[in-house]
Amino acid sequence: MTQVLEQGLQAAALRQHVLANNIANINTPGFKRTRVEFERQLAQALQSGEDPTKVKPLLVVEQDRTAGPDGNNVDLEAEMVRLVENQLWHAAMTRQLSDHFSRLRLAIYGRE
């Protein structure tokens, strides 16, 4: 469980970097936004009984999204929404990891 949460936190950190890069390049002609795929792959691994620790974040450059006249396909509002979603995802995983360690401490020491 700890390793899967760690992978999720690493994917969230990578996504934060990718989203910041997308936003930084909003005015770069021809720039194509990148996204990080992780959660769907993790869910599929868990449902199929595969080892979830083998799931790695995948970077996908979106070539097929509607681009502006300069060929750039970054939508600032959408990227900002994705930033907030990613921050919530990161906070939820951090909380789960903290709760997990609290339970381990309780099991080891018999108190918190």
Image (cartoon, rainbow, N blue to C red):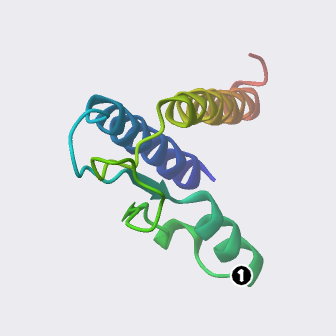
Q: Which one is nearer the viewer's eye here, 34 or 103?
A: 34
Left or right of residue 82: residue 7 = left
Q: Is residue 66 above or below residue 63?
A: above
The x, y position of residue 15, in whole percent, is: 43, 43
What is the total number of numbered labels drawn onto the structure image? 1
> Which amino acid does the dot numbered 1 rest on?
Gly
The x, y position of residue 77, in whole percent, is: 55, 29
The x, y position of residue 10, in whole percent, is: 42, 44
Q: Name the residue at the front extreme.
A: 69
Q: Which one is nearer the viewer's eye here, 64 or 40?
A: 64
Q: Name the image quarter holding residue 111.
A: top right
Left or right of residue 102: residue 82 = left
> Which residue matches tag 1?
49
Q: Residue at x 41, y 35 (%)?
A: 16
Q: Residue at x 53, y 30 (%)?
A: 83
The x, y position of residue 88, in whole percent, is: 65, 28
Left or right of residue 49: residue 65 = left
Say which element carries label 1. Answer: loop
Q: Name the residue at the left extreme.
A: 29
